Image (cartoon, coloured by chain):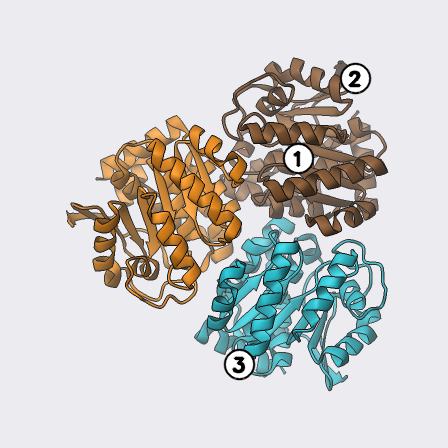
Chain colours: A cyan, B brown, C orange
Amino acid sequence: MKESVINNLKTLREKGPLVQSITNYVVMNNTANALLAVGASPIMAHAKLEMADMVKIVHALVVNIGTLDEFWVDSMLLAAKEANERNTPWVLDPVGAGATPYRNETLTRLLTFKPTIIRGNASEIMALAKANVQTKGVDSTHSSDEALAYGKQLSKETAAVVCISGETDYIIDGERLTKVKNGHALMGKVTGMGCTATALIAAFAGITSDPYLATVAGMTTMGLAGEIAARKAEGPGTLQLYLYDALYHLKESEVKQWAKLEESHA
Amino acid sequence: MKESVINNLKTLREKGPLVQSITNYVVMNNTANALLAVGASPIMAHAKLEMADMVKIVHALVVNIGTLDEFWVDSMLLAAKEANERNTPWVLDPVGAGATPYRNETLTRLLTFKPTIIRGNASEIMALAKANVQTKGVDSTHSSDEALAYGKQLSKETAAVVCISGETDYIIDGERLTKVKNGHALMGKVTGMGCTATALIAAFAGITSDPYLATVAGMTTMGLAGEIAARKAEGPGTLQLYLYDALYHLKESEVKQWAKLEESHA
Amino acid sequence: MKESVINNLKTLREKGPLVQSITNYVVMNNTANALLAVGASPIMAHAKLEMADMVKIVHALVVNIGTLDEFWVDSMLLAAKEANERNTPWVLDPVGAGATPYRNETLTRLLTFKPTIIRGNASEIMALAKANVQTKGVDSTHSSDEALAYGKQLSKETAAVVCISGETDYIIDGERLTKVKNGHALMGKVTGMGCTATALIAAFAGITSDPYLATVAGMTTMGLAGEIAARKAEGPGTLQLYLYDALYHLKESEVKQWAKLEESHA
């Protein structure tokens, strides 16, 4: 599994996939910088009038509902529909799932266009699995362990790879389960770390035909970069910047040495 | 007064209040990171279709008109109305007050929903007090001293706590006046420092029933973090990052040692 | 030419021009910080209801189509029209020109209001010159050298100063051509560096009557700040922050010593 992460990282840097993101205002700068640092090329268009044209030229799509509204939801639906029709991989980030009925309704509509991958924190994945769990805003109030059964159910219902991110990240498809135990607690004090992980997953999905392995590569890369950044950071402010430096410099040997991956059957 | 700041900071970190912000695009990332660093939990939703639901679950609300438009103003009014009805504390940041008639009209409408706290620079507070002062864009061209009389008038007319931020910050309610003399000149060269102060005030307002003391705590915390960051920063770029580190690590002993607060009657 | 850069930088810091930007969500924070660091004062308003009022009080305008949509395009057109009528200098940043028909149509409409300066990468300038070049998203797939002939044509057709940014930047008007050979490769791994250059150009255009020299000053300042930042940076994350520090501290002697400018006839 480590070999797969290493190979995918190498391929990503060679190919420089184009990733289109309809994402939230808070993290646009961060996720664009993370994509550039890891070797991808970001686009952040959202106009309905160019959505189909944009999706046509990209290798992967992110739909992140963090700062959704009635105009942007239309664009998200258009983009997801186009990606689905073209078999372009797309990643759904259900920010704040369960916090309001509007988010839930929007997510139900987006699911009809069959996301390739869904990444959320424990509360979001539980809410999305219709668990009627009360989400506290956009931060998780549940552990990834608790959410595992819901994640499996969601993966079965949607046929998407599901990633529950947290102290341990779970990556699930119908048959496989991988746990990623990289990352650092300080990452929870920087906004948009989950959204950034989603963007990295999309970059990997743009260069490999296996979305499960793309998700493992994205979460491992993110966790390792966070760990490396945290060694040097003096707080959440510097962590955010060192993270891009770490993504940019991440070496095969570091993945080999530090990646903590556990595989089992789903 | 220092004891109150220390106690409120401690409570804030224990409770982790949920703060909903309808704020400007320029500073969303910064204010979310500042809220996380100080111990609060940020939400940045703006959709009309979920505004009432969001305001219901949060402990405080920020309305910042920096990049207002006709769609966002509707959301701001909805959120302010809901907060007012629910007695949820809300903080108004009148960015660019006086710069255009549209800003002034919008502020007049927002004032009808009785903000708990208003924080602006001298020019903004003077404009908001209908002083017919010409504002130069979003930066202040007046000193806080000049604005003090206007701030008192505004506090009386609106029953809000008024904070005029600048080299010296003035915090005013009907009876009390506190001056905060912390901060650093380099902070004026980083965008969104005022907006960040507003966000911190809201976080404190979410955990104490006295909005006056919440404002003192917010401005003191912001000023101290800025000072600590400036000692290490080599310019405005590094200052911005070190500020989050400083907010995250700010100690009771540092508040005790360095806070410069002066109290008097309003 | 170096003397002109030095004098314009000095004037910029003395005058503190007000720069209004209708720009993309990804870079708003960055370009506001760059403007503050270099000595200008940023405004980021976009509401149609205040556009004419805002353009009236500013010294220069940026229109950057990076995250355009039907609402923002209306504001861009209003602002460009107002700037053109008032002889306020305005800079067009044609992000992603050629990527979609919608971008091309929007650019055609904006060109009718006669931008004072146009800055783009090679692919964007070629697309804008109706070269029917396929743009790969928002990053350039052509060298500045290839784009030179197109840039000259575009400058002739529009009477605008044209800047093609890249490893070597070309600044063109009807008679003159200056090459700026400053900058650093790592800048390509940070989002919004081109947009930031555009903002700096606008700041200089706000304090000098010669838009050609303003463009040379903007690109030289940006390139030098990037070089200085890159000496210290450990990756793209830290580069972005050190860039603001470098802009803030940039000395006349550094411009004299390190600026690499070559002049010739267009």
Nearer the observer, C239 or A30: A30
Q: Earlier in the sequence, mark 1 or mark 2?
A: 2
Q: Do callouts 2 and 3 mark residues in contact (Cβ within 8 Å)? A: no
Q: CA distance from mark 1 to mark 2?
A: 22 Å
- Labels 2 and 3 in the same subunit: no
Disc 1 sits on a residue from what chain?
Answer: B
Task: Answer whether residue B211 is visible to the viewer in this image.
Answer: yes
Q: Secondary structure at mark 2?
A: loop
| B4 left or right of C137 in image | right
Q: Residue at x 85, y 68 (%)?
A: A131
Q: Secondary structure at mark 3?
A: helix
* On screen, residue B128 above or below A118: above
Q: Which mark is residue B17?
A: none
Q: CA distance from mark 2 to mark 3?
A: 66 Å
Q: Residue at x 53, y 45 (%)?
A: C29
Q: Which residue matches tag 1?
A: B197
Q: Residue at x 71, y 16 (%)?
A: B152
Query: The disc labelled 3 sits on which kind of residue?
Result: Asn
* On screen, residue A217 above or below C77: below
Are there few (<14), some (14-19), or many (20+) residues within 10 Å of tag 3? few
Q: Which residue matches tag 3?
A: A7
Q: Secondary structure at mark 1?
A: helix
Q: Which residue matches tag 2?
A: B174
Position in image of residue A222 (x %, y %): 61, 66
Position in image of residue A192 (x %, y %): 64, 56
* On screen, residue B176 above or below B209: above
